[in-house]
Image (spheres, rainbow, N blue to C red):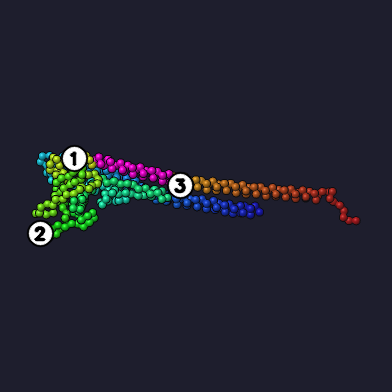
Amino acid sequence: MFDQIRAAASERFSEEKNAIDSKAQARSEAIDAQNERYIAVKAQINNAKIAVESGFESIQTIRNYLLDLRNTIALAGETGEDPELRAGEFDAKIAQINGEADTGGPAFNLVGYINRVDFSPHTIEYRADLALKVTELQGTYIGHDWRIHANDGTYWVPDLGADSLTQYSELQGEVQKTTLSDGTEADKTSSLRNAVTLVSYDSTTGAITLDVTFDPSQPAETVTGTLEQEGNGLFGSWFYDGLTTSTGRQQAFDAIEKAEIELTSRESILQKAAGLVATDSRKIDEELDRLSKDKVAALTEQLDETEQLQVTTAQQIFAMQTNLDNLSQQQQNYINAFAGFVRSPFLRFNLTA
């Protein structure tokens, strides 16, 4: 009979243990699912953090390039130096600066990829929690982009990678044409290295005049308009007399000094972005830590409930065994007592007449 009782208790134990395990598994799966969602959010925040850190690195790289430019300008003024060679070095370094600004993809860049139509900076958005909160990081531009809005309504826009200048009917309009001395028609595009000359520039009003050559055998075209620009303010050597004059070289030195100040100002925009990223990252880390603690608590609760079930079951089996032993002992006592009573001489009598 005890085996039957123990089997029944074991069956109840298994049922209750399965209930405990099922509850714990459901809770664990819910925690894991929540954890995965937070990890996905953290991944977006980490990408934004990479963009911010890369921006700081690019600013430092450009600061180093500015030191190189100072050295190039100084050498251009030395006796026996080739100004054209130094101007080429200067222009190559300017191209490196603009290239550094746009390094990496847009998803990881807060200091480049300017909108060339309205000069608005690039921005990065990321999900900041499991609800609908989205953080937008405002970028900046540490390269230099510019164009000239001519008095005739057209636009002269540079190709920063090719060091050329092209006339368009309007922003994002059609390329204008010119007729060369041999009668052929060509785009109105000139090299900023050797076919564009700065005639005058007023930094207060932005008024600017250029001489642009399309064909060496033809007179240069004079372009007058307003300079529109964004970024660090550094032009190629054409803007500074090709570094051939002391005035031009001093203007280049002054432009570098302003660019250094501009970099510091734009670095503060990155610092603000870094603060936003750090705040969002900390909040997600707190949630992940909470979920980790919940996971441990769920496991601890499962173990505690299982242990308590084992103790309770063992106690119940022991109690039932004790009860059975007591019943068995009482039964034996009754049997022994009855047997003694039957053997008593007082119960003996003669049934015959």
- Magenta region includes residue 283: yes
Q: Say which residue label 1 marks.
A: 253
Q: Please report contact status of discs 2 and 1: CB closer than 8 Å, yes or no.
A: no
Q: Nearer the viewer, mark 3 or mark 2?
A: 2
Q: What residue type is labelled 1?
A: Phe
Which badge, 3 or 2, is on the more N-terminal residue? 2
Which badge, 1 or 3, is on the more N-terminal residue? 1
Q: How crowded is mark 2: few (under 14 residues within 10 Å), some or many (20 or more)?
A: few
Q: What stretch is highlighted in magenta?
A: 260-288
Q: What residue type is labelled 3?
A: Leu
Q: Say which residue label 3 marks.
A: 291
Q: Say which residue label 2 marks.
A: 182
SS class of the residue under badge 3? helix
Picture residue at 38% right of the left edge, 49% below the top: 134
Q: Please report contact status of discs 1 and 3: CB closer than 8 Å, yes or no.
A: no
Picture residue at 50% right of the left edge, 52% below the top: 26
| Residue 324 x, y percent position in the rendering | 67, 50
Please state which of residues 178 and 3 is positioned toward the viewer in this rendering: 178
Q: Is residue 131 left or right of residue 323?
A: left
- Extreme residue in the left direction: 217
Let me know if residue 103 appears in the view. no
| Residue 110 x, y percent position in the rendering | 30, 47
Q: Nearer the viewer, mark 2 or mark 1?
A: 2
Rounded to the nearest angstrom, the CA distance separating label 2 from label 1 is 41 Å
Q: Is residue 328 left or right of residue 43?
A: right
Which badge, 2 or 1, is on the more N-terminal residue? 2
Rounded to the nearest angstrom, the CA distance separating label 1 from label 3 is 57 Å
- Extreme residue in the right direction: 353
Picture residue at 72% right of the left edge, 50% below the top: 331
